[in-house]
Amino acid sequence: MAERPDATLEAALGVFEVFASGSLIDEVYVLDDVSGKRIAIAPTALKDKYRRG
């Protein structure tokens, strides 16, 4: 993220969408095939930090 500050969290992780989880603290899970798409589950604080819009 430091090299590309304008990138979204989705682009940095190479996923279709990032979902927030209040129970995660310092881990990001990437799931390769959820309805044919690659998604990630990240801590809420991380998702909020890189929220766009």
Image (cartoon, rainbow, N blue to C red):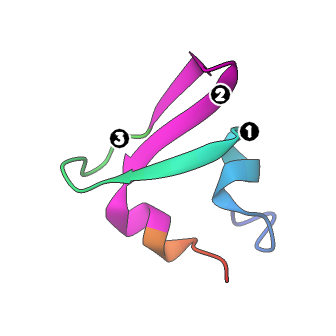
Which residue is pictured at 52% across the width and 38% down the height? 40
Instruction: Tell me: residue 12, above or below residue 44.
Output: above
**Residue 38 within the segment the image draws in magenta:** yes
Q: Position of residue 53 (x, y in %)?
A: 67, 83
The answer to whether 30 appears left or right of 10 in the picture is left
Query: Spatial distance from mark 2 to mark 1, Cα to Cα?
Result: 8 Å
Q: Which disc number belongs to residue 27?
A: 3
Amino acid at circle 2: Arg
Q: Are the residues flagged by discs 1 and 3 in contact, CB closer than 8 Å? A: no
Q: Are the residues flagged by discs 2 and 1 in contact, CB closer than 8 Å? A: yes
* Marked residue nearer the N-terminal end (1 or 3): 1
Amino acid at circle 3: Glu
- Label 2 belongs to which residue? 38
Amino acid at circle 1: Gly
Which residue is pictured at 76% across the width and 50% down the height? 11
Q: Which disc number belongs to residue 14?
A: 1
Q: Secondary structure at mark 3?
A: loop
**Closer to the camera in the image, 2 or 53:** 53
Disc 1 crowd, CA 10 A, few/some/many (<14, 14-19, 20+): some
Query: Magenta-highlighted stretch: main secondary structure?
Result: strand
Quarter of image, res 5: bottom right
The residue positioned farthest toward the left in the image shown: 23
The answer to whether 6 appears left or right of 15 in the picture is right
Q: Which residues are magenta?
A: 29-47
Q: Position of residue 18 (x, y in %)?
A: 55, 49
Q: Position of residue 44 (x, y in %)?
A: 34, 62
